[in-house]
Amino acid sequence: MDSQIFELRNVHFSYLGKFPALCGIDVEINRGEKIAVIGANGSGKSTLLQMLDGLIFPGQGQIKVFGKELKESDFQDADFSENFRKKIGLVFQNPDVQLFCPTVREDILFGPLQLGMKKKEIEARLEEVVGILGINGLLERSPHQLSIGEKRKIAIASTLIINPDVLILDEPTAGLDPLTTRHIIELLIDENAAGKTIITSTHDLHIVEEIADRVFVFSQEKKIIRSGNPCEILDDIQLLEDNNLIHVHSHRHTGKTHTHPHQHLEHHHEG
């Protein structure tokens, strides 16, 4: 099927062979979709995204990308590896993982230079990405001098400049102020409108309707317990509560008890 990008069948993965992180994952993602992955800390979201980016591989089960089974040995072929990295880009949960050069400019240019993109194309893409993210004033700064929101924008820029077909983002709005969050949401919507497939893991349930056509819900058992459109997932308070995405407080007012769902807003790195 031409439109299918990812197909996972009964995928299991354990860290060090003994700490389960994915337990029987079945997923299909098609070209041009906007996907949100939600779940409590440690439920497997980051692990799934890293597998889609070809950084880790199933211990059991199968992952197909663009119709071909993906194996670790494929990346020993330089042409395959370069082609894959041009098509699929991951923005990590912790931007410091991606930022290691002396200046912001060098960090953004690192990926396209490694992938052998032509100088003219790189310069045009740099100008475009800097304009989209409003980071022109940061280019000569050291990444270590930046705020978390600025670092996140630079990490996104360093992936976006490659112009991948598939943009994968792990908690891109975690800990950001509302204005920066709004900029990133609009960026994802625009990139999807331009034809990119967008896959985002998030704890911020209030952004899910805008950034997703389909939502995958991870349970604490490291499985996808439900998938569906954002409205049906977000309206299922019991599902969200059972999977530690919201908690319900009871309040008594004038002799009556009212319950109010609250989103869990804490953000931790997950394995």
Image: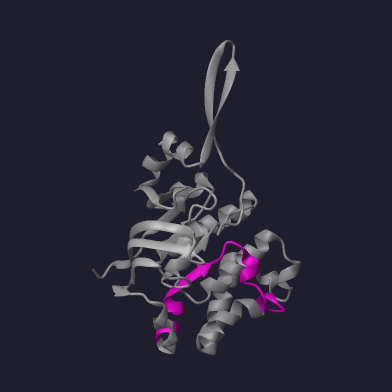
Q: How many labels does the image show?
A: 0
Residue 88: within the magenta? yes
Nearer to me, 252 or 148: 252
Residue 82 horizontal side relative to residue 33, left or right: right
Q: Horizontal and vertical percent for residue 150?
A: 67, 63
Q: Horizontal and vertical percent for residue 194?
A: 41, 66
Asked which colour scheme the image uses, the reply is one colour
Q: What stretch is highlighted in magenta?
A: 80-105
Q: Is residue 242 visible?
A: yes
Quarter of the picture holding the N terminus: bottom left
* Outermost residue toward the top in this view: 255
Nearer to me, 28 or 55: 55
Q: Can residue 211 be seen in this view?
A: no
Which quadrant would residue 250 be assigned to in this image?
Answer: top right
Q: Horizontal and vertical percent for residue 216?
A: 40, 51
* Outermost residue toward the right in this view: 145
Nearer to me, 35 or 129: 35
Q: Horizontal and vertical percent for residue 79?
A: 41, 88
* Vertical relation: 132 (above or below) 35: below
* Vertical relation: 205 (above or below) 27: above
Quarter of the picture holding the C terminus: bottom right
Q: Which residue is drawn at 43% across and 82% down?
A: 75
* Outermost residue toward the front in this view: 18
Residue 139 horizontal side relative to residue 222, left or right: right
Which quadrant would residue 59 be assigned to in this image?
Answer: bottom left
Q: Residue at x 54, y 89 (%)?
A: 119
Q: Residue at x 44, y 60 (%)?
A: 199
